[in-house]
């Protein structure tokens, strides 16, 4: 078992990390779940450059794929919107990472506050 002083220090450190996480969460602005993919297309026009040698396909086109509340979707993203969308995606990824981290730290903190279950000290059952 940990010394009380060490335990207090660890709890203090965990609380400080959680406080920092919350601060970062509070500062997150625009969010959007999903991921971007880039596509080049071949069209239907005969003799188009996309069928030349070498082929010069149309694009790039950017698609945003996402899943939200069990439903997936895809939408085309205008080139002009890419920088903002990328920031939103990065913020969302950061949010998920921070929440995961918070859960881990909070669980550690909860465990520290409680007596660890005595390992190898199970009550013996009689058969
Ligand atoms: Zn074409």
Image (cartoon, helix red, strand yellow):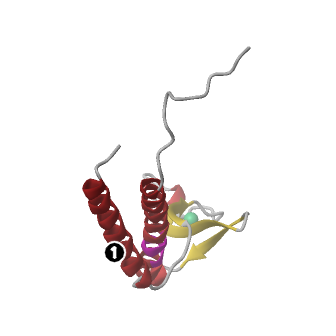
Q: Quadrant of the C terminus?
A: top right
**Residue nearest the viewer, comparing 78 with 68:** 68
Quadrant position of ligand 1 = bottom right
Q: Position of residue 53 (x, y in %)?
A: 44, 52
117 to 78, vertically: above or below:
above
Q: Residues within 10 Å of mark 1 (few under 14, many from 20)?
A: some
Q: Residue at x 61, y 63 (%)?
A: 43
**Is 21 in the magenta?**
no
The residue labelled by disc 1 is 20
Front residue of 20/49: it is 20
Residue 12 vs residue 73: left or right?
left
Residue 67 placement, left or right of 64:
right
Q: Which residues are magenta?
A: 88-92
Residue 100 at x, y percent in the picture: 48, 61
Residue 124 x/y as whole percent: 62, 22
Q: Is mark 1 within 8 Å of ligand 1?
A: no
SS label for mark 1: helix
Q: Residue at x 36, y 75 (%)?
A: 19
Question: Looking at this view, is 57 or 1 the one in front?
Answer: 1
Quadrant in the picture for residue 98:
bottom left
Total label count? 1
User: Where residue 26 sits: x, y (%)?
Assistant: 43, 84
* In the image, residue 52 above or below residue 25: above
Overall secondary structure of the magenta section: helix
Picture residue at 35% right of the left edge, 43% below the top:
1
Residue 34 lies left or right of residue 15; in this view the side is right
Rendered residue at 53%/56% (across/down): 51
């Amino acid at each position: 078992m940990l010394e009380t002083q060490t335990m207090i220090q660890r709890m203090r450190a965990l609380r400080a990390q959680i406080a920092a996480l919350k601060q970062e969460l509070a500062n997150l602005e625009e969010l959007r779940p999903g991921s971007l993919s880039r596509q080049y297309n071949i069209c239907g026009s005969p003799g188009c450059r996309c069928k030349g040698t070498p082929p010069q396909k149309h694009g790039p086109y950017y698609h945003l794929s996402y899943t939200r509340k069990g439903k997936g979707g895809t939408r085309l993203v205008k080139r002009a919107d890419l920088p903002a969308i990328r920031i939103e995606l990065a913020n969302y990824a950061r949010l998920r990472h921070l929440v995961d981290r918070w859960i881990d730290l909070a669980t550690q903190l909860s465990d520290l506050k409680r007596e660890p279950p005595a390992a190898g000290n199970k009550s013996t059952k009689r058969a």
